Image (tube, grey):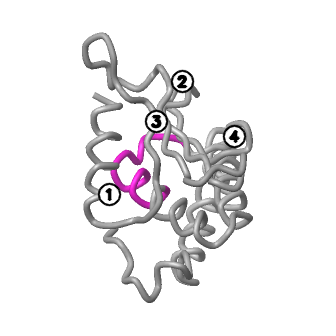
Amino acid sequence: MPAKSPTNESDGFSAEERAAMKERAAELRAEGKKGAKKAEGLEAVLDRIAQMAPEDRALAERVHATVTATAPELLAKTWYGMPAYANADGKIILFFQDSGKFNYRYSTLGFQETANLDDGDMWPVSYALQKWSPMVEQKVVELVTAALS
């Protein structure tokens, strides 16, 4: 999903996008117990994102859209009250921490030890996010892809 234009960026998901996500949650619930768990996780993430301040919400929505498009096999769920994405075993791969959570000056995209980002004896596992751009989106796609490799 491409980045939104600057005029729509702070508005978050469109009504159509929200409706589509709610429909997907309903589809997952209809799949039975396993699908219901996925739906609950997705709804919890969307509810948490909706509670964020506008700037954080815009970033979280773009992260969510990018992660789910890049790695649809990851399960959305909340983790310590943050939107997170887990593998099939339920282990968190990455999470989004909004700046308002701990009064930080920037939001964070973080990766857990299950992410395959190892690079020698030292590598970054957390990235500051202040604004969304095509370049940021490309970097998030690369990180998510690498984390799952």
Disc 3 marks which residue?
Answer: 126
| Marks 2 and 3, how far apart at CA | 22 Å
Tell me the quarter of the picture where residue 135 sits.
bottom left
Asked whether, in this view, residue 14 is left or right of residue 146, the answer is: right
Which is more foreground, mark 2 or mark 1?
1
| Marks 1 and 3, how far apart at CA | 14 Å
| Marks 4 and 3, how far apart at CA | 33 Å
Disc 4 marks which residue?
Answer: 33
> Which of the two labelled residues, at mark 4 and mark 3, occupies the earlier sequence position?
4
Inspect the image, locate mark 3, and give the three-letter code of the amino acid beneath it: Ser
Q: Residue furthest top?
A: 121
> How many marks can you see?
4
Q: Is residue 30 visible?
A: no
Q: Residue furthest front?
A: 105
Asked whether, in this view, residue 36 is left or right of residue 109, the answer is: right
> Which of the two labelled residues, at mark 2 and mark 1, occupies the earlier sequence position?
2
Q: Are marks 4 and 2 in contact (CB under 8 Å)?
A: no
Inspect the image, locate mark 4, and give the three-letter code of the amino acid beneath it: Lys
> Which of the two labelled residues, at mark 4 and mark 1, occupies the earlier sequence position?
4
On the image, the x and y values in percent for residue 41 come to 66, 47
Tell me the quarter of the picture where residue 62 sits.
bottom left
The residue segment tinted magenta is 64-75
Give the residue displayed 52% in from the left and 46% down from the top.
108
Q: Are marks 1 and 3 in contact (CB under 8 Å)?
A: no
> Which of the two labelled residues, at mark 2 and mark 3, occupies the earlier sequence position?
2
Q: Quadrant of the N terminus?
A: bottom left
Inspect the image, locate mark 1, and give the three-letter code of the amino acid beneath it: Val
